[in-house]
Amino acid sequence: MPLALLALAAGAFGIGVTEFVIMGLLIEVGGDLGVSIPAAGLLISGYALGVVVGAPLMTALTASWPRKTILLSLMAVFTLGNLACALAPDYGTLMAARIVTAFAHGTFFGVGSVVATTLVAPDRKASAIAVMFTGLTVANILGVPLGTWLGQSFGWRSTFWAVTAIGIAAFAIISTLVPADRMPPERTRFRDDLKVLSRPAVLLGLATTVLSWVGVFAAFTYIAPLLTEIAGFEESWVSPILLVFGAGLVAGNILGGRLADRDLMPAVLITLAGLTVALVVMALVIHTRTGAVAAIFLLGVTGFATVPPLQMWVLEKAHGAGQSLASSFNIAAFNLGNAIGAWLGGAVIAGGLGLAALPWIAAIVPLAAFGLALLSRRLDSSSHPARDPVCTQT
């Protein structure tokens, strides 16, 4: 794998840290800015919505730019956004800065996925995407725990200063290692790029992405109470167990990339089926400590194993004009799934079904995603029917 992929992974690492580290600093942020914990929690939702809105907007604004220029510009937005977070005098300013920072997220991963596939041989494209996303998984294992510790020890602003420094470093690495475009992107109107969203296969791919991560986050958002109230762990065990989940993310990311390189559509189906099974297993074993730890690792593996195949699927179906836009929309779809999953999990708990019901309900959603993927496969088969053998007589 070329070093340029590691440069993309460096950018993904910084974005991953800034997205998730706020989860561990809600108490510090709320106390310093004089807002409630639920209000501080909206900083997570604000970021997710910023990704959903920013992905198509930034992709449209930069459609005719060279891809390396796009990546560097997005890292500049990311860095300045985190600097604004570190300097934010009040809650409203911090929310606005988080949303601005999120605008870089979807297009960076969307365009970065396209760039990654141009750096390797055709049979390694999904693995190249997986290498870039490794930065996101490592952010969960190392960056988020370290950022949380830093914010708890020296104030939450110190974490955003550190992420700002990461952004500067990622900008320099991308500038040095990512090659300039061999051919400039085709100049197309945004209206023409939007036509990619009229393709049924692309829409099915985006919907499948949303559903798959609704399932992941319906369970993962409430992993702390699941561990403490259902599995019986003390609160001090939550962070170490989350490291186990992070290790599963890394393993699943690599596995998903390799499966997709072998055969894309079977990889999509296998990983979605695996995610469904993992959530069912979690529902069955979450009441025991050993079973809970094993289930959380399995959730990490199967959850992120879906990412390279789903991203590659949308890229493949959106060939030609609009590919970067479709890729960015798919990143937005992951984040939309995160937001809906967190809401669904809360609705299950508020509805009186209890924490133990979460994995059961969550398992239904990737099963529905599996059904959509099967439908897409059948549509592909019907649009490209096998030719009947032609018999001739002489």
Image (spheres, grey):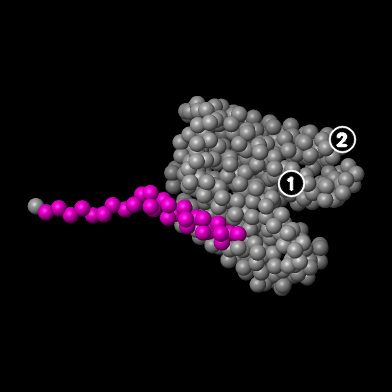
Residue 187, numbered circle: none
Q: Where residue 218 sits in the image (x, y, percent)?
A: 68, 58
Q: Nearer the viewer, residue 26 or 157?
A: 26
Q: Local crowd at mark 1 within 10 Å, few (<14), some, or many (≥20)?
A: some
Q: Residue at x 51, y 59 (%)?
A: 371
Q: Give the residue type that dot 1 points to.
A: Ser
Q: Does the magenta-highlighted stretch encompass residue 94?
A: no
Residue at 63% of width from left, 58% of height from top?
Answer: 215
Q: Residue under circle 2?
A: 89
| Residue 132 in sight in this render | no
Quarter assignment of residue 175:
top right
Res. 65 in view? yes
Residue 291: x percent and y percent?
Answer: 68, 71
Q: Is residue 258 left or right of residue 92?
A: left
Q: Which residues are magenta?
A: 365-393
The verdict on residue 387 being magenta is yes
Q: Vertically, is 144 above or below 106?
A: below
User: What is the secondary structure assignment of the residue under circle 2?
Assistant: loop
- Percent across and percent down for residue 21 are 75, 47
- Residue 3, given in percent of the width and then of the height, sits at 56, 39
Q: Closest to the observer: 333 or 226?
A: 333
Amino acid type for the residue under numbered disc 2: Pro
Q: How far is disc 1 from disc 2 in space, using C-alphas?
A: 20 Å
Residue indicated by mark 1: 45
User: Which secondary structure is most common in the magenta stretch?
Assistant: helix
Count every numbered label the image shows and give the total: 2
Q: Residue at x 84, y 39 (%)?
A: 91
Along the polypeptide, which appears first: circle 1 or circle 2? 1
